[in-house]
Image (spheres, rainbow, N blue to C red):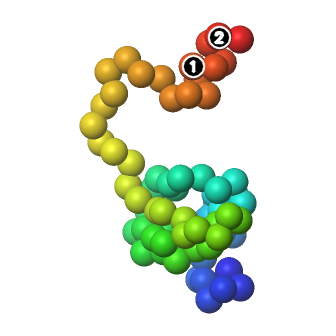
């Protein structure tokens, strides 16, 4: 928010900050305000945060890695 994004809602700023600090590959959203910030937020590792819409193509039987690990215990 201090970097010139003062119009962000606190919840959106928290999501962006969390993604940037965690060095996530991409932040998925349908929020046009956040999509406009694609590659404008610096991540902790120095790269830019990629903000994009989620891939609408369903993945037939693949679970996300976290869900897969939870299933294994």
In terms of depth relative to the viewer, which is nearer, 45 or 5? 45
Judge left or right: residue 62 versus residue 4: left
Name the spot of residue 55 as percent of width and height, x first: 33, 45
| Secondary element type, mark 1 | helix
Name the spot of residue 23 as percent of width and height, x first: 64, 56
Q: Residue at x 50, y 54 (%)?
A: 26
In the rendered image, the quadrant that contains the C terminus is top right
Quadrant in the rendering for residue 21: bottom right
Q: Residue at x 33, y 27 (%)?
A: 59
Question: Which residue extends farthest left?
Answer: 57
Whether residue 6 is visible: no
Tag 1 residue: 68
In terms of depth relative to the viewer, which is nearer, 47 or 41? 47
In the rendered image, the quadrant that contains the N terminus is bottom right
* Structural distance between the alpha carbons of marks 1 and 2: 7 Å
Tag 2 residue: 72
Dots 1, 2 in contact, CB < 8 A:
yes
Name the spot of residue 57 as percent of width and height, x first: 27, 37
Judge left or right: residue 35 versus residue 19: left
- Around disc 2, counting alpha carbons within 10 Å, would you say few (fewer than 14), some (14 to 19), or many (20 or more)? few
In the depicted structure, whether residue 68 falls above or below residue 11: above
In terms of depth relative to the viewer, which is nearer, 10 or 41? 41
């Amino acid at each position: 928010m201090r970097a010139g994004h003062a119009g962000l809602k606190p919840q959106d700023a928290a999501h962006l900050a969390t993604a940037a600090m965690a060095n996530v590959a991409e932040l998925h959203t349908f929020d046009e305000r956040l999509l406009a910030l694609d590659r404008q937020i610096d991540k902790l590792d120095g790269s830019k945060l990629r903000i994009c819409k989620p891939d609408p193509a369903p993945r037939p039987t693949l679970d996300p890695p976290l869900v897969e690990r939870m299933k294994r215990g």
